[in-house]
Image: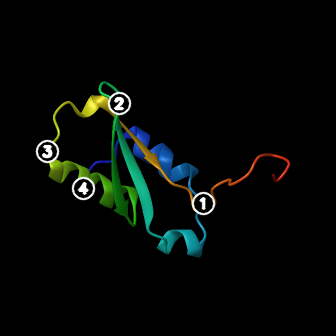
Amino acid sequence: MKKSKKVKQLEDSAPHDDYHEKENRVYVFNNVLFNFNMYVNADSADEACEKFDQCGFANREQWKIMVELGQQPCRGPDGE
């Protein structure tokens, strides 16, 4: 499967330690035209794209791919 430029950028920005490599992530496919989100659990961006492709959605250019990071900020800058 050929990786799109967005998926490649996403993988390059993700942490590459052993913990995060084995962690299952939540990928969000956002349809920018209709503001519709589809959530996919996958071990890698490739697996998430394979699952997305199995859905058979048309107009792939209308979709953006986002990923949940392992360490999400949970509070504001003051820790409140």
Secondary-structure class at tag 3: loop
What percent of the width, then of the height, locates residue 51?
A: 24, 56
Q: Residues within 10 Å of mark 3 (few under 14, many from 20)?
A: few
Q: CA distance from mark 1 to mark 2?
A: 28 Å
Q: Quadrant of residue 41?
A: bottom left
Q: Amino acid at mark 3?
A: Gly
Direction from residue 27 to residue 18 in the image, left or right: right
Q: Which mark is residue 15?
A: 1
Sequence-wise, the earlier of marks 1 and 3 is 1
Say which residue appears at 29% left-offset and 52% top-offset. 49
Q: Amino acid at mark 1?
A: Pro
User: At 53% from the left edge and 51% from the top edge, which residue is drawn?
Assistant: 12
Q: Earlier in the sequence, mark 2 or mark 4?
A: 2
Judged left or right of residue 27, residue 78 is right
**Residue 10 appears at what percent x and percent y?**
49, 47
Q: What's the mark number on residue 56?
A: 3
Q: Which residue is mark 2?
A: 35
Q: Secondary structure at mark 4?
A: helix
| Dot in front, 3 or 4 | 3
Tag count: 4
User: What label sits on residue 33 in the rendered view?
Assistant: none
Compute the Cα span from label 1 to label 3: 30 Å
For disc 4, the marked residue is 50
Q: Secondary structure at mark 2?
A: loop
Q: Amino acid at mark 4?
A: Glu
Q: Earlier in the sequence, mark 3 or mark 2?
A: 2
Residue, far right = 78
Q: Would you say the residues marked 1 and 3 are in contact, meaning their CB atoms lie under 8 Å apart?
A: no
